[in-house]
Image (cartoon, rainbow, N blue to C red):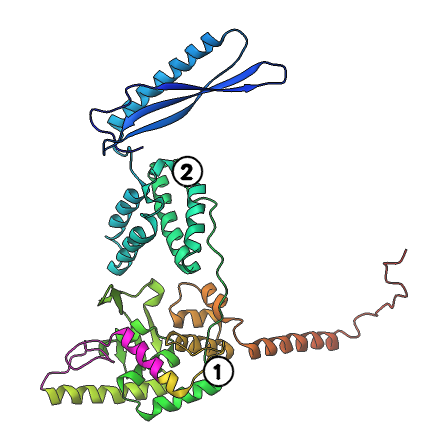
Amino acid sequence: MDTLLPAETFATYSLIKHDNVRKDGTTDYKWKAQYPYKDENGKWKKKTVTLKTEGRDNGRSKQVEKAANQEAEAIRQQLNEQAVKDPHSGETVAEYFGKYVEERANSIERSSANELRRILKSYIAPSIGAIELDALTPDDVAAWVTKLSKKYSPSTVKKCLTNLRSAMRQAVDRDRLVKDPTRGVKNPQQAHRNPNALDAKGRAKVAQFIALDPDKPLNVGFALAMYMGLREGEICGLTWKCVDLDEGTVSIERTIGRDGSKWYVKEPKTGGSRRELYAPSIIADMLTARLANAKAECLELGVPFDENMYVTGGADGSFMQPHYLSHRWRIAADALELIGTEGNRPTFHDLRHTFATAAVTAGTDIKTVASMMGHANAAMTLNIYASADREAKKRGAAVVEQAYMADVAQHAKDGSVIELNRTGTED
């Protein structure tokens, strides 16, 4: 309910009787009680409650009506007690979600917290946000999802529902709600998209392009994505401290995140994202050349080289912004006239897809690919990449056929085959 004015609680009520005339001429009837009150804006509203008391027109209507009045009066007193004692009385979905966000903000990245605030402001508050938390139903949530789906992408709607569900489940866990109002509400169906990876010809083009200026920061960034599967934020957040050229390893310990128009250094997105990777020789050579140039740049500017400087950053200690890296990749992809396996111009993230697809096609086991990619579990890698390559499917079918033929050859003399004249389906 709305927040009541201090002096305006449920002062009175009125009974409404609903009649149902039966075929035999008698009447069943139920009562509802309406309780007028003023909200915090001074507007009169009514709360309607269906009473348990019911009766039949058998000459005792007065007695039943008296019982209905007694029940209605008891409810009125109970409502007044709740209005005084319940600190959550009148709390809306938007108000509860706002508290949920601010509590979570203490344990998540600030960009993630701001994304939750944006979801509240743009998607929840304008619609179901005004509904009282206790009154929110699965039908309300389903209607909200349907409305959003007409205007926004399935991924956006899924994100909104997922976060609302998380807040509502917290409300249930904390005894704020009896049932989760998002129960049974489905996410909108999302079209499956295969990775738009580069094929062998496209990979060769990019490799040759990178080799023209192997110590150039942008080319180093492109190579780290295609040869090692790094995310753009991980590439821009990579410091020389995390590069061990003697051991040939690269450690992912931080990344660059975005909060509105601001970029900042943060922890990797998941525990699996923090990882140590072995650099292939071409990457090791590029990093060696890039390190020599970085030290030369510092010497030219008269500043000491610091291992905390960024591999693709400047001598002033700044990092390359991820959107700049992806923007320059689009220019390069256009110039090289690259087309991915799905028939589209590959994005920078498609270089990461290219790495994973090539690794799976080459026979690297899924668990290892998942670890190299920094995925939370191998199932994610399996769902995205295991069936992305047509040639891999063809080879897989041939391998199974060969295995069966070998079984036949090995056990050809183990028993005799009985030839049946009838199929077993005749009458």
Residue at 35% x, 80% y: name it. 330
- Please identify the dominant SS of the magenta region: loop
Q: Does the magenta segment cover residue 325? A: yes
State whether residue 363 appears in this view.
no
The amino acid at mark 2 is: Lys
Q: Are marks 2 and 1 in contact (CB under 8 Å)?
A: no
- Vertical position of residue 31 compared to residue 329: above or below: above
Residue located beneath label 2 in the image: 179
The image quadrant of residue 108 is bottom left
Q: Does the magenta segment cover residue 105? A: no
Residue located beneath label 1 in the image: 199
Pick whichever, 189 or 307, lies toward us.
Answer: 189
Query: 420 left or right of 156?
Result: right
- Characterize the local packing of mark 1: few (<14), some (14-19) or many (20 or more) Cα atoms within 10 angstroms: some
- For the C terminus, the quadrant is bottom right
For marks 2 and 1 on the same chain, the one whose residue lies earlier in the sequence: 2
- Vertical position of residue 16 compared to residue 273: above or below: above
Q: Position of residue 137 (x, y in %)?
A: 42, 39
Query: 68 left or right of 311?
Result: right
**Which residues fall within the magenta stretch?**
302-331
Residue at 47% x, 76% y: name it. 357
Q: For numbered disc 1, what is the local secondary structure? A: loop
- Vertical position of residue 260 compared to residue 128: above or below: below
The amino acid at mark 1 is: Asp
Q: Which residue of the protein is positioned furthest toward the bottom in this rendering?
A: 212
Q: Position of residue 205 (x, y in %)?
A: 42, 89
Q: Which residue of the protein is positioned furthest toward the top in this rendering?
A: 59
Pick whichever, 216 or 145, lies toward us.
Answer: 145
Q: Which mark is residue 98?
A: none
State whether residue 354 appears in this view.
yes
